Amino acid sequence: DVEQLFDEQAGVFLADRFVKGTCPKCGAGDQYGDSCERCGAAYTPADLVDPVSTLSGTRPTVRSAPHLFVRLEPLHAFLAEWTRSSGAVDGPIANYLAGHFLGEPLRDWDVSRPAPYFGFEIPDAPGHFWYVWFDAPIGYLAATAEWCAAHGESFADWWGRERVQPTAEIHHFIGKDITYFHTLFWPAMLEATGLALPTRVHVHGFLTVNGQKMSKSRGTFLRART
């Protein structure tokens, strides 16, 4: 069991987007419960400073709830080497990862969330769901598998470690707020399962409106005229 924020008024645990507070790493305000958009740190909702429920606007209490974790530390040496020397990430990104995450033991990765939550419910665990950044990248594999099935291709030819397609490359184009997930969590998943690693992870900054990141959830966006 782990400590989890609980909204007494709404009667639910608060995961990720259901709670906001101050980042425990850099002190940025108005941050969600899983990661900081300012510094890129990943943490649990219980780590937030001065958390407030986005459901009721009240200050949550702390309760224990069961969660599933993936141990990342056994892959520490691999991740340090891959981010530094594979050419998959730019030098400044590799330096950022080394300075913020790989300079100390990697924390176990919390890959489950209690209801209410969007996404896929965990088999044999009613009321518990896979964390979005655990299941979402698997969609890259699923999309390839679906395409292969429709075109008579072999999935292993494209994502296998010893793939038959020698010219196949895997490129991810992401915003900087999900760097952590695509340069540490995702490569760890691929390495552990024997699948091909990304050729390149292209990390981009934010488009901003009045100095703030464009975000649908925060309402800082422009609507195109149709």
Image (spheres, grey):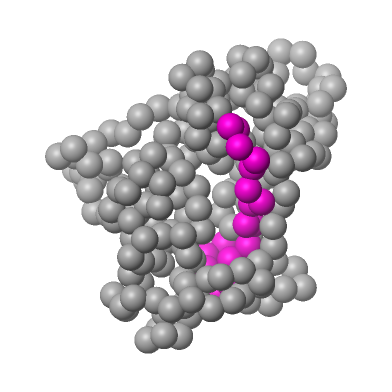
Left or right, 158 with reference to 26 = right
Q: Position of residue 135 (x, y in %)?
A: 63, 52
For the record, the magenta segment spans 102-119
- What residue lies at 23% left-to-right and 45% top-to-bottom? 221
Above or below residue 131? Residue 107 is: above
Work out whether residue 148 can be spotted: no
User: At 47% across and 33% down in the image, what residue appears?
Assistant: 174
Instruction: Tell me if 88 is positioned left or right of 222 in this view.
Output: right
Q: Residue at 51% across / 16% down in the picture?
A: 91
Q: Quadrant of the N terminus?
A: bottom right
Q: Residue 122, how many percent across, how many down? A: 70, 66
Residue 28 at what x, y percent from top left?
30, 48
Name the spot of residue 161 as percent of width and height, x first. Answer: 81, 26
| Residue 161 appears in the rendering | yes
Tell me if 149 is positioned left or right of 110 in this view.
right
Dominant secondary-structure state across the stretch colored magenta: loop
Residue at 36% x, 61% y: name it.
49
- 66, 122: nearer the viewer: 66
